[in-house]
Amino acid sequence: MSRAGRAVVAAVRLDRWTEDDVRRGVDEAMSAGVGGFVLFGGDADRVSRLTGEAAIAAGRDLWFAADLERGAGQQFRGLTELPPPAALAKHPLPREAAAAAGTLTAAEARSVGVNWVLAPVTDIDAEPDNPIVATRSFSSDPAVVGELGLEWISACQAAGALACAKHFPGHGRTLGDSHVELPVVDATSAELEQDIAPFHAVTRTVGSVMVAHVAFPALGSGRAATVSPEIVGALLRGRLGFDGLVATDAMIMSGIGDDDAAAAVEAIRAGCDVILYPGDVIRTVTALDRTASDDPLFADRLAESIERSDRALSGLPPTGAPRDPEAAEIGLDLALRTVVDRSDGMSGWRRDRPTEVVAVSDDPEVGPPAGREGPLGTIVERDLRAAGWSVRPAADTIRPSSEPAAEQRVVVLAATPRGWKGHGRVSDEATARLRKEMSSAERSLLVMLGHDRWLAGLGVPGICAWSTESVMEHAAAAWIDGRVGPGFGRK
C-alpha cells in the first residue's frame, strides 16, 4: 500500500449518509491508507464507536477531525453547544471565556475519539458584508482575535486535542464564500498585515493551520492560497516561521476548482501537509502517488508532509482531559453572560399577559444545528411557559388583521452566516417579515440569533443571542424572564 494516502483525511458524513454509505466510505478510505477522517454529525455514542473501530482496523494512530467552532455539540448530539467566538468576545471576562470554551471543546472531543479540533477561526471580522465569517470571528480587531484565539488554542491543546487556526491568511475581507466560488481579496499588502497579525500571534503555539481557498494578489499569487507557494511556503513557513501541520480547507469546495485531485498535488507542492475532505479519495491518493513516482522532489515534499503529520499525531496524549460532568451548565453560563441588550428596557412586560413567540428564519431551507432540541423558537416558548409566562402557541404565519393583536410578542430571528446568501446582513424578506410580526403586538422584542451589528442595524428593540444553537435560545429565554441581565421587574 502506498504511503501517499497518509496525507489525506477523508470525510465521514454521519449527518447525511446511511449506515451502509458510512461503512462503504470508511472501508474505501482505509483501503487507500488514509491518514484519518473528518467527521460530520451523528450522536456521541455513534461517533465514539466509529473512531474506536476505525483505529483498531487501521492498526495505527489516525486523525479524527471535526469542525467544532461552537463546542463539540455543534456536530455531535449529546455533547455541549457553546456560543460562537463573537459572543465569547462580549463576555465580561473574554479571555477566561475563550479558555473555558477551548478546554470544554477539547475534553468532549477526546471523549468520543476526536483528536483534531478544526477551530478556532482566527480570521478578523473585517468586512461587514462578508457572507461566511461574521459571528465565527472573535472580533474586527486583530489584537483581540490574536489574544482570544491564543487563549482558546492553549486551553484546547492543554486538554489533549490539536487545535487549528483558520483560514490563513484570512477569510474576513471576502465578499464571497469559498464554498461556492474562489473569492479574490483586492486589499493591499499593508491592509492584509491586519489579517495576518492574529495568525502571527498564535503560530508559536497552535499545532495546525488551515489555509483558505481564497486568492490574494497583493501577496504574490492570483491563485487560491491553498496552492500558492508564496503564501504557504514563503509567508506561513518562511516569514511566520510556522513548523506545525498545514491543512487545506475541504477540497470539495468550489473555491479550489473543478479538479480537486490535481489541486491536492499542487497543495502538497506549495507546502500543505494534509488534504482534507477530497471529493474522490481514491482519485486523490492515486494522483499523489503517481506524481511522487514521476517527480523525486515532489516525493520528498510528500514524505516531509507525512512525517510532520505522524509527528503531530504521536505527540498527542493517549487520552484527553476527562469530560466535565457539569459541561452543560458551563455552556449555559457562558451563553447567559454573552447576551447583548438592545431592548431599551422592558417596562410593562408581565408574565401573566398573553405572550406569543414567533420564529422568522433568514435561511428557511437550512436545517437546525446537530444538537438543537427543537424547531426555531420552540425553546424560547417552552422555557418561558415553564417559568410561568402565559404563552400562546407559536404562530407559523402572520396572523390575519382581523385577529386581535397580542399584548406581548417575542420574534426569534435566525440569521447565521451562509455563503449562498451573497451578503452579510439580514435579507430584505426576513426584515419585512419580522417588522410586520413586531408591529402586530402592543410590545415586541426581537431575539437575534446572529451578529449584534445586524440587530443594531435593524433599529428595533431586541437582544442579541448570536447563533441558532439551543444553548443560545435558552440564554435568551432566561434573559427575557429576568434571570440574567438587568432586572426589569417582570412579574
Image: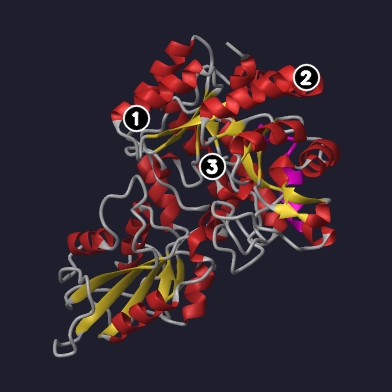
Is label 1 in contact with label 3 (beta carbons under 8 Å)? Answer: no
Question: x, y (%) of residue 474?
Answer: 32, 57
Res. 389 mark: none
Q: For numbered disc 3, what is the local secondary structure?
A: loop
Magenta stretch encompasses residue 156: no
- Left or right: 486 in relation to 247: left
Crowding at mark 3 (Cα within 10 Å: few <14, some 14-19, many 20+): some
Distance, label 1 to label 3, CA atoms, is 18 Å
Residue 344 sits above or below residue 363 on the image: below
Residue receiving disc 1: 21
Q: What stretch is highlighted in magenta?
A: 194-208
Q: On the rendered image, what quadrant is the N terminus found in? A: top right
Q: Earlier in the sequence, mark 3 or mark 2?
A: 3
Q: On the rendered image, what quadrant is the C terminus found in? A: bottom left
Q: Can residue 194 be seen in this view?
A: yes
Q: Camera-side residue: 201 or 240?
A: 240
Residue receiving disc 3: 252
Residue receiving disc 2: 300
Which amino acid type corresponds to the residue marked 2 in the rendered image? Asp
